Image: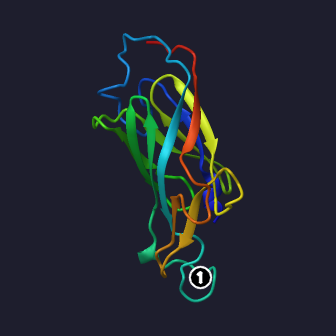
Amino acid sequence: MSLLSFVSLLLLLPTTLCSPFPQLSHPLLSRQNTTIPQAEAWSITAISLHFMGSNTGLGWPGQPWPENKKFNTSLEFTVATPTGDAVCTGNWKEGTGDGFEGECVDERGAENVEGGPNKRETGAWTWWLSETYQTGTHHITNNSPGNPDSYLTCLSGPPLDGIRCAMNGVMSARGDVVLEVERLRKPNV
């Protein structure tokens, strides 16, 4: 399950979005507001991840996935910020991070947060989100209940269903992932 060693969340927060997302129509802060917000904490309150994994569940370990049964990795998580919750969803080609498509939508329905994977090395990923002038990170692992950063329990399902991961499972730390968010320098507006 090396794919799950990936979730090191890096939250970058500019006023506008960059690829793969369109420009914001309703940014969290007015373009006239150039004040950098104070440091704060955000919480990731839910994470759900589904991916193929190396074993199909049919026959012997390592048996290749049938072409017609392959699927993209999908991720959904909720970030609680002082301005409200944002639900982020995304998917990408299994095992690569290539072709990432995703969005984050806040409680108002505005696409004001962006996110996506950046592959650093096999099994190591950086996840980023962006909103307004702040950044925060948290490394997340899985299936290590003694590790305080192990927020995900990942279990394989029936044959050809892959692996599903969620927070607060039997093999993970309990509670929200707390991100200490710090200020970035004032952007050009």
| Residue 172, x across and y down, in percent | 61, 59
Tag 1 residue: 63
Disc 1 on helix, strand or loop? loop
Q: Position of residue 64 (x, y in %)?
A: 56, 79
Q: Is residue 160 above or below residue 152?
A: below
The one nearer the camera, 7 or 124, is 7
Determine whether 94 is above or below 40 in the image: below
Q: Closest to the observer: 15 or 78?
A: 78
What residue is drawn where x is 58% and y is 66%? 170
Q: Taking 107 as reference, is 70 above or below it? A: below
Q: Residue furthest bottom?
A: 59
Q: Residue at x 43, y 76 (%)?
A: 69
Q: Quadrant of the C terminus?
A: top left
Query: Is residue 91 shown left or right of residue 155?
Result: left
Image quadrant where residue 85 sits: top left
Name the residue rendered at 41%, 45% in the picture: 88
Q: Quadrant of residue 53?
A: bottom right
Q: Position of residue 123 (x, y in %)?
A: 66, 57
Which corner quadrant holds the N terminus? bottom right
